[in-house]
Amino acid sequence: MLATLRAIVEAVAQQPTLTEALNRFVAMVKEALATECCSIYFADYSQDNFILMASDGLNPQAIGNFRIGFTEGLVGLVAQREEPINIAHAQSHPRFKLSPEVHEEGYNAFLSVPLVHQRKVIGVIVVQQKQARSFSNDEESFLITLSAQLASQLANTEAKSILSVETTVKKTSVLKGVSGSPGIALGRGFVVIPKLDFESIDMQKSDNVEQQKKLFAQAVSATRQDFHIMASTFSDSMPKEAVAVFEVYQQLLDARSLGRQVEAQLEQGWSAKSALKYVIESLVSQFNAMSDPYIKERAIDVKEIGLRVLHHLMSTEQAVKSYPKDTILITHTLTPTMLAEVPKESLKGVISVNGSANSHASILTRAMGIPAVWGIEDIPLLQFENKDIILDAYAGRVYISPTPALKKEYKQLHLQESKLHDKFEAEHHLEAVTLDGEHISLLLNAGLDLSTEQEIAKYCDGVGLYRTEAWFMQKGQFPTQAEQEQWYRAVLTRYHPENVVMRTLDIGGDKVLDYFNFTEENPFLGWRGIRISLDHPELLLDQLKAMLKANTGLGNLKIMLPMVSHTEEVDEALKLLEQAYFELQEEWSDQFIQIEKPEIGVMLEVPSSIYLLPEWANKVDFCSVGSNDLTQYLLAVDRNNAQVADLFDPFHPSVLRALNQVASQCQNLELPFSLCGELGGEPEGAILLIAMGYRRLSMNISTMSKVKWVLRRLKVADMELLLGECLKQSTTKQVHRLLKSFMIENEFSELLYQSKH
C-alpha cells in the first residue's frame, strides 16, 4: 500500500489544475481500493455547504453543481465529527440523505474521511460500493493516511487554481498568512527566487505556440553550449569515460527524446516553462519508480538537464527586469540581502512563504517599518509576478488583482494610517511620562537599519539592544578587531552620553553567516548565542577587546551575553572579559589612555535563566528579557514555523506570569532589569510590562512614537488594575479580550485595526 500511496501523492502533485488533480485522485483511489465509486467534496465556507468537486462513479452532471449543507447527510456528519465513518448499509443510517441528482441509489457500503488542513475541514473523501460490507481496517487506514498526506497539497492546489482563474477572468483572490510587520501596502508583485526549481513554476497556457517553441529552442541551444564548454574544460584533466557524461546529456536534449515530449506539450498550448516542468517531473517520477538503482540514478541527470534549460528560459525573461516604484517583494524565505537590493524608496511590502511573525527576518522588516505577511500557502511564486497586490499586514491577508472598489477602500485606510502615524510623530520629541508622573525609558533596538537609526538617536533614551551580528552578516568573512573597533566607536559616539547595550555575537537559529554556516536538526535548540562564542573564545576575545577599545574616553558601553542557560557560561564569559581587559592594559602602555571595565549583563531568553537569577545577581550588573525567544521556549513553538505561528503569542498567561516573576525577583534582588523583545513595542505589551515594574523598554524605531503617545495618556495605577485581571486569566483569548476592552475604554480604539474582509 505504501507504493500506491506514494504514486497517488506524486500523480496529484504533477497535475496542472485543481480539476485534473481531483479527477486523477478519485480515479486512482477507486482503482487502489477496487471499489465502484470515489468522490471528493470541498467545503465552501461562504455558503456553509460542501460542493461535489470530482467523482468516478456518481453522475458526471452533478460535479461542480451538487451541494450539500455542512449539517446534512453522511458527508456533513463526517465533517462535524472530524473522524471517519465506515458503514455497510449507508441508506439505513439515520443521517443518510437521498439526493437523486447524484445517482447513488445503488450504493450500500460507505467509507468516508475528512480532509483537515491547519485545524480546518477543507473537504471530505467518500468511497462507495454496491455490495453491503464494512471496509477493512487496512482500507480505512489507507484512506486516513492518504487524506492526511494530501490535505495540505490539495489546499495549495486549490490556491493555485484560484490564482489561475483570477488570471483569466480578472477575479480578486485572497491568500491568508500571518501578520509580520503591521501596515497596509499597495503595489506590484516582484518575485525573487534565489534557488530555481520546478516547484516554483506554475502551469500556464500561452496563445503563441510558435513563440514558445522558439524560446524553448533557444534555451536548449544555450544548454548544449554549456555542456560543450564543460566537456572542453574537463577533457584535459579527466578520463574520457567521465567526460562522456556530457555527451549523454547532449543526447537527452535531442529532439527525439526530451525535445519531442516538450514539443508535444507546447502543441497543447502550454508555455515553454510549463511544458518543460510537466515533462521533467513525469520523467523523474518514472525513473524514481524503477527498482534498478542504475536507472533510478538517471532521475538526477534528467532533473539537472531540465533545470539547466529552465535557467536559460528564466534568464531570457528576466534580462530586463527592474524593481517597480511600488515593489511588493515576494519570496520563499526572506533574507537581509534581498531587502538591501531593493531601493528603499521603492519597497512597499514583503510577502514570504516561509518564516513567521516572530522570525528575525520579520524583526528586520518591523525595524524598517515595512508591512510584511508570512506563512502564505506554498504555491508557485511566479503566479504573483507583476500582479497588482494589496498587502493587509494587520489582518495577514494578501489580495491578488484587487478590484477598483477594493483598491479605493484600502487607499483610504492607508491614508488614515498615515494620519495616525503623523499624530504619533508630532510627540516623538516629548518625554515618555505617564499621567501620574512615572518616567519610562524608551530605548532603541538597533543594528539593523543604520541610516534611519541615526536620525532618531537624539529622541531615544539610549540603546537597549545593539545587535552586533548585523555587521558580521554584511561581511564575507569574520571582521578584524580593528574593523569592529571602528564600528563600535561610531555607534557609541552617535548615542553618547546615553548608554549603548551591545550584545555579543548572537548567531545560530535563523541567523547564519555565509562564511560560517552549519547545519543542525534543530537549530533553535542547538549551537547558538553564547554557546558558539564560548566554543570559539578567540572570536569572543576579539570582539570584547574591540568593544573595550571603542569605549575609551566615552564610557557609555554596556555588554550583554545572549542565550545564557547555565551558570558556567556566565563564569566563563566573565573570565574572558577579565582576560581581554588585562591584556589590553598590557598592550596599551600609553598613560593617557584609560581602559574602563564596562557593566556586563545577561539576556533572559531561556526558561532556566529565570530560576538562576538569584545566583547570577551576584555576578552580573543587569539583565534584559528577550521576550521573543523566551516566548518560543516557554510555549515550545518554533517561531519560524508558519504551521504553528498562531500558537506563538507573548500574551499567553504563562508568558505574562514569567515576565511578572522576573520583575518581582529583580526588584527583590536590586538587579536592574529591562525588556528588549518585540512585546515592548506593542502598546498593550508596554502597558502590562510597566504595570509589572519594567521601566526600561527597548524597541524598534517604527514603534517608539506610538508607544510613547499611548503611555503619555495613561496612569500606572490603571495599568496595574488591568495587569491584575490579565494574570488571573487561563487563556490567551481571555487576555486579548481584556486588553481590547481597556484600549476602547481609554479611547485608543483607532489603534485596534479590524479587517472587514
Image (spheres, rainbow, N blue to C red):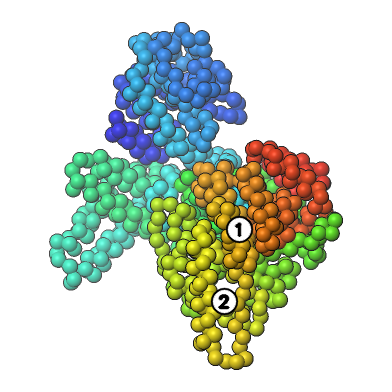
| Outermost residue toward the top in this view | 92
Pointer 2 residue: 547
- Residue at x-position 49% and y-position 75%: 541
**Viewer can see residue 576:** yes
| Outermost residue toward the left in this view | 240
Amino acid type, residue under disc 2 in the picture: Met
Tell me the crowding category of disc 1: few under 14, some 14 to 19, or many 20 or more residues within 10 angstroms, Cα based.
some
Q: Secondary structure at mark 1?
A: helix
Which disc, if any, is residue 436? Answer: none
- In this rendered view, identify the residue nearer to me: 303 or 139: 139
- In this rendered view, identify the residue nearer to me: 472 or 116: 472
139 up-or-down from 289: above or below: above
Q: Quadrant of residue 399?
A: top right
318 up-or-down from 722: above or below: below
Residue 275 relative to residue 359: left or right: left
Amino acid type, residue under disc 1 in the picture: Pro
**Viewer can see residue 367:** no
- Residue at x-position 38% and y-position 19%: 37
Pointer 1 residue: 614
Residue 192 relative to residue 261: left or right: right
Q: Give the x, y percent position of residue 586.
A: 51, 87
Q: Secondary structure at mark 2?
A: helix
Placement of the C terminus among the 4 image quadrants: top right
Tell me the crowding category of disc 2: few under 14, some 14 to 19, or many 20 or more residues within 10 angstroms, Cα based.
many
Task: Indicate which label's residue lies in the foreground, 1 or 2.
Answer: 1
Residue 280 relative to residue 458: left or right: left
- Tell me whether the residue at label 1 lies in contact with that at label 2, contact meaning CB atoms closer than 8 angstroms: no
